[in-house]
Amino acid sequence: MSLIFILSFNIFICVINFYLLWQLIRIKKYLKTLNTRLIYINKNLPLIIKEVSLSILTTALEIKKIKEKYRRLKNNISNVQKILTISRIIYKIVYQTN
């Protein structure tokens, strides 16, 4: 009876060891992939940082242009409102005198 227990226990330990070995192989493969990706990112990081800063600067320039166009539009609206007000006054003056 004890021989069966010892054999079954050893088989169980052997199965657990194979499972752990399989997990170690998977982790090693994953770490190797991760390492290659990190090396690639590390090599290209200065380019990525330059591209990001360039993108930020171009976006800031576009925002500045849009703000300037908005200010001009506001001024044009104000000028048109002034012209309409003056034309209404002139219209009232001309048609009230007749």
Image (cartoon, rainbow, N blue to C red):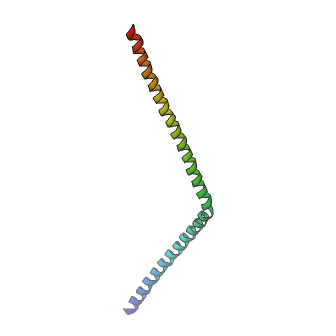
Q: Position of residue 34 (x, y in %)?
A: 55, 68
In the drawing, does residue 55 fall left or right of residue 79? right
Q: Nearer the viewer, residue 78 or 51?
A: 78
Q: Nearer the viewer, residue 22 or 4?
A: 22
Residue 75 drawn above or below residue 33: above
In the drawing, does residue 50 fall left or right of residue 24? right
Residue 53 drawn above or below residue 75: below
Q: Count the marks: how many? A: 0
| Quarter that holds the N terminus | bottom left
Q: Position of residue 4 (x, y in %)?
A: 39, 89
Asked where in the image residue 5 lies, by quadrant, the reply is: bottom left
| Quarter that holds the C terminus | top left
Q: Residue at x 57, y 67 (%)?
A: 33
Q: Position of residue 2 (x, y in %)?
A: 38, 92
Residue 13 drawn above or below residue 77: below
Q: Residue at x 55, y 51 (%)?
A: 56
Q: Nearer the viewer, residue 33 or 12?
A: 33
Which residue occupies the extreme left position in the image?
Answer: 1
Q: Residue at x 40, y 10 (%)?
A: 95
Q: Residue at x 41, y 18 (%)?
A: 89
Q: Nearer the viewer, residue 17 or 97?
A: 97
Q: Position of residue 18 (x, y in %)?
A: 49, 79
